[in-house]
């Protein structure tokens, strides 16, 4: 449900027929969306921020959501800082994006910008004393999940960000959205926009919030639609607090959704629709798969003239649509979109029968004696073992082959027969994988590290 031309988030909210019943929960804060749509947390500085390039640096994701609603259509550009962006990276980001205003909560960000306006946010929202100026087509700038140095910044527009959102059915009960993502990343922002444009409410996750605490909050507020990465969901399945939620719709995105996690969710939440979606910060939302199977139908690539066109070039998935980012910020990042309009996602796929399966990232390959190994392909085999909850495959240096394959495995519960489980995993790998892909060692681990974006933490080759 893309917004009309020059329609801001605030105006969309103000036009909502269900506005009075909708809420935004952030931690212990409970804000009616009607109060947000008619108020401001910017201390009377909204007019001064008109037409500026604003760096949005908040510790609390609730303030980030409020600022986006207030600044869309008012600011020329909003640069949305993820929570793990280092303070040391702020000056270069601000210079690259032409920042002339900073909106923040809590402590003043460590930035020295000549003639820039610094605005601290406060709750509760104060009633607006004047209507905002004529609306701008605000640029929404997001950071990619960089692996070293300062990640790239990409430019989106509200119409592209909301291009995959379908209109709400007025006969359906209003949804209560929740996500394990932070809304300052692409995946979390998508859910915030679905809640705001789809006549729903939303419960926001807090940075570093324990899984059990978040699940308890989601359950208290009656979340009906819940999203996260497969790694997020594996942690949910390991938590006794999973019984506190009763979602009516589950969606996975951000990582490869293998059959093991899809089947586990189906068993834990019987009768609940479970889908997985493909999206990236650069390519935007690509597609959803709702048939309960990993991968996606090959027929998706045969669609022509639709909202999203797809193709596979040299094994990598490429997308073309109005949902993609328009460009990187700054001149040193190179082109984002090819001459023919396609974005190369870097995600490698392999056709098996009438279906494509994701096998990993182009830059995540392990080189074993000149042969390419995608860790995710091996993890998908390991994760099928009934005792395994999740796994991480990586390369270890070898003086003979350059690298060997090793695996770390998290079990569903402590097990006295770990040696037998390891033997069974190796046997399964031998049945389904080429010899050079079989792990040379398996280590049982209590947990696996995750990035701030909810993905398994991988060392990139």
Image (cartoon, grey):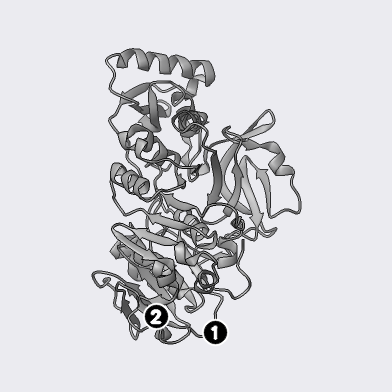
Tell me the residue at 66%/44% (across/down): 313
User: Residue 324 versus residue 59: which sits nearer the camera?
Assistant: 59
- Residue 396 is situated, as x and y percent measured from the top left of the image, at 36, 31
Residue at which label 2 appears:
100
Sequence order check, earlier mark of 1 and 2: 2
Left or right of 406? Residue 288 is right
User: Residue 208 versus residue 361: which sits nearer the camera?
Assistant: 208
Tell me the residue at 31%/72% (across/down): 124
- Residue 231 is situated, as x and y percent measured from the top left of the image, at 41, 39
Query: Where, by quadrant of the figure, is residue 143 drawn?
Result: bottom left
Which secondary structure lies at badge 2?
loop
Tell me the residue at 55%/40% (across/down): 275
Nearest to the eye among marks 1 and 2: give it: 1
Q: Count the marks: how many?
A: 2
Residue closest to the far left:
107
Look at the image and tell me whether residue 447 can be seen.
Answer: yes
- Residue 352 is situated, as x and y percent measured from the top left of the image, at 65, 29
Label drawn at residue 134: 1
Query: Where, by quadrant of the figure, is residue 338 drawn?
Result: bottom right
In the figure, 207 relative to 31: above or below? Answer: above
- In the picture, the quarter occupied by the C terminus is top left
Look at the image and tell me whether residue 406 can be seen.
Answer: no
User: Residue 459 versus residue 86: which sits nearer the camera?
Assistant: 86
- Residue 127 is situated, as x and y percent measured from the top left of the image, at 38, 80
Q: CA–CA distance between discs 1 and 2?
A: 20 Å
In the figure, 426 relative to 351: above or below? Answer: above
Which secondary structure lies at badge 1?
loop
């Amino acid at each position: 449900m893309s917004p009309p031309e020059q329609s801001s988030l605030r105006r969309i909210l103000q036009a909502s027929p269900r506005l009075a019943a909708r809420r935004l929960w952030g931690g212990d804060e409970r804000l009616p969306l009607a109060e947000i749509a008619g108020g401001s947390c910017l201390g009377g500085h909204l007019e001064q921020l008109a037409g500026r390039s604003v760096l949005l640096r908040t510790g609390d994701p609730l303030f980030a959501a409020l600022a986006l609603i207030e600044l869309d259509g008012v600011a020329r550009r909003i640069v949305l800082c993820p929570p793990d962006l280092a303070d040391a990276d702020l000056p270069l980001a601000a210079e690259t994006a032409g920042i002339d205003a900073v909106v923040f909560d809590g402590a003043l960000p460590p930035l020295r910008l000549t003639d820039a306006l610094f605005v601290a946010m406060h709750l509760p929202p104060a009633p607006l004393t004047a209507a905002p100026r004529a609306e701008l087509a605000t640029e929404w700038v997001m950071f990619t999940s960089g692996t070293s140095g300062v990640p790239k910044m990409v430019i989106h527009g509200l119409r592209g960000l909301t291009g995959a959102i379908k209109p709400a059915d007025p006969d359906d009960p209003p949804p209560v959205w929740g996500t394990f993502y932070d809304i300052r990343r692409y995946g979390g922002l998508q859910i915030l926009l679905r809640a705001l444009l789809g006549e729903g409410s939303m419960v926001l996750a807090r940075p570093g919030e324990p899984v059990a605490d978040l699940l308890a909050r989601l359950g208290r507020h009656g979340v009906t639609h819940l999203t996260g990465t497969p790694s997020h969901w594996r942690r949910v399945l390991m938590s006794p607090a999973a019984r506190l939620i009763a979602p009516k719709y589950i969606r996975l995105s951000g990582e490869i959704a293998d059959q093991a996690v899809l089947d586990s969710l189906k068993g834990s939440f019987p009768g609940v629709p479970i889908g997985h979606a493909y999206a990236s910060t650069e390519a935007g939302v690509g597609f959803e798969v709702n048939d309960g199977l990993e991968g996606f139908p090959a027929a998706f690539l045969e669609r022509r003239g639709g909202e999203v066109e797809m193709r596979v070039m040299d094994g990598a998935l490429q997308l073309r649509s109005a949902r993609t980012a328009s460009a990187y910020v700054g001149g040193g990042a190179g082109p984002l979109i090819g001459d023919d309009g396609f974005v190369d996602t870097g995600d490698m796929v392999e056709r098996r029968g009438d279906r494509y399966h994701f096998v990993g990232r182009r830059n995540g390959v392990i080189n074993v004696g000149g042969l390419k190994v995608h860790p995710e392909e091996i993890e998908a085999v390991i994760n099928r073992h009934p005792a395994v909850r999740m796994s991480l495959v990586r390369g270890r240096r070898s003086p003979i082959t350059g690298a060997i394959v090793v695996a770390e495995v998290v079990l569903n519960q402590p097990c006295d027969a770990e040696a037998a489980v390891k033997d069974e995993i190796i046997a399964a790998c031998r049945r389904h994988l080429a010899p050079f892909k079989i792990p040379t060692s398996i280590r049982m681990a209590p947990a696996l590290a995750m990035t701030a974006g909810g993905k398994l933490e991988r060392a990139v080759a």
